[in-house]
Amino acid sequence: DATVFSMIQPTGTVHLGNYLGALRPWQSIQDRAAAVAGGPRVIYGIADLHALTVPKRGRAAAATLAAQRREAVATLLACGIDPERATVAFQSGVAGLHTELFWQLSCLAPMGYLNRMTQWKDKRGGDPARERLGLFAYPVLMAADILVYRATHVPVGDDQSQHLELTRYLAERFNAWYDCDLFPLPQTLYCGGGHGKKVRSLTDPQRKMSKSSGDAMSLVYVTDSPEQIRAKVRKARTDSISDSFYFDPEGRPGVSNLLDIVAGLQEVPMATVERDVAGLRDYGAFKGYVADVIVEALRPVRERYARYSTDTQYLQSVVDQGNAAATEIAAENMRRVRDVVGLTQSM
Ligand code: ATP
Ligand code: MG
């Protein structure tokens, strides 16, 4: 009865961190699930309601979000998500159900717990104007996203571990509160041998690579051209030791991030990467090597994206089907939630 569920926000073009931390694992999970009879159900969502936590403004806002939602679907397909094997749905396309469970969970969620979430501290960035209820509460919506499918496994990057902990806490609390066992406690699923779980910004390796960071030079997009990838890697912040390249995340965060990306893309141990770069004697050669690996690894994604991104009819049919399939599952679970809480619609 296993269900795998995860989501990505349509907040900008997908980057290497999303790819290594989420989308590539999503693909391998989907393929492994399809390979066994009665394997887990797999649902991948596009978190368009979450995108509103940092709302765009004005008349152009709707067109921007529409374009980003479309781009997100095309990118999932480009990264190998196969609608025959995985349900691809919009959070807002499962009308009302994510937000209804969000409300049920909100009524059990302690403010103090939410106040300690690191992404709340990060994303409001010390700016009181950003301290909005939605941004504060969105980890609870995320818990609802997961629990509305009664998911058992959630493949995400390292930055989401705190949110998953909250999800388990709320699932347990709901079960205890209503004395039921409705929600399984979802496990965080890390994939890919450990490398690429936390890809860092190219310009500031203290920070994670992030769609909403605003600085295009800090990210490698999966749709970047080879020239763009080479330019970004060339400008990546490193250090002054320029005749040897080895993994030392504390002492050499920039170089270590690039090595981690290579190990993640090639799915090999760090020792293998260190051996491969052992003969390189300056930054030109080292960064050229890293850029070559990235350019090649992303080639199929880049090519498929070019194909899918213009086929709006196909994209539409994928999400129409996905929304319907996801709604069916969520509606059945919400019927059970309403029973437990006392909101059954029959007298
Ligand atoms: P935003 O800045 O809008 O929050 P994001 O880059 O953090 O965007 P999300 O849509 O929030 O991307 O996350 C999608 C998935 O990508 C999640 O599973 C998340 O854990 C993973 N992820 C995000 N950034 C990284 C990263 N730097 N390294 C590894 N995984 C990441
Ligand atoms: Mg994020």
Image (tube, rainbow, N blue to C red):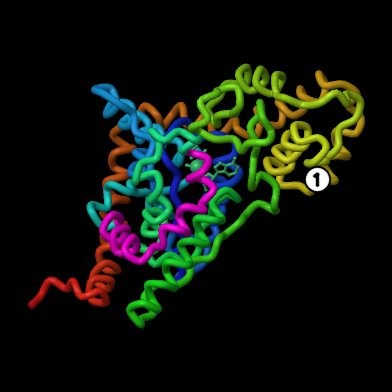
Q: Residue at x 80, y 45 (%)?
A: 270
In the foreground, 275 or 175 = 175
Q: Secondary structure at mark 1?
A: helix
Residue 133 lies, in percent from the top left, at: 34, 46
In the foreground, 305 or 171 = 171
Residue 157 showing in the rendered view: yes
**Magenta part of the chain:** 98-123
Residue 276 lies, in percent from the top left, at: 85, 36
Quarter of the image where the N terminus is located:
bottom left
Query: Would you say the beta carbon of the disc 1 residue lies within 8 angstroms of ligand 1?
Result: no
Residue 329 showing in the rendered view: no
Q: Is residue 100 left or right of residue 154?
A: left
Q: Which image quadrant is residue 59 in?
A: top left
Residue 13 lies, in percent from the top left, at: 47, 31
Q: Which image quadrant is residue 325 in?
A: bottom left
**Badge 1 amino acid:** Met
In the foreground, 8 or 174 = 174
Q: Residue at x 44, y 73 (%)?
A: 172
User: Which residue has dot 1 on it?
Assistant: 270
Is residue 347 located in the magenta-colored stretch of the structure? no
Q: Is residue 217 left or right of residue 73?
A: right
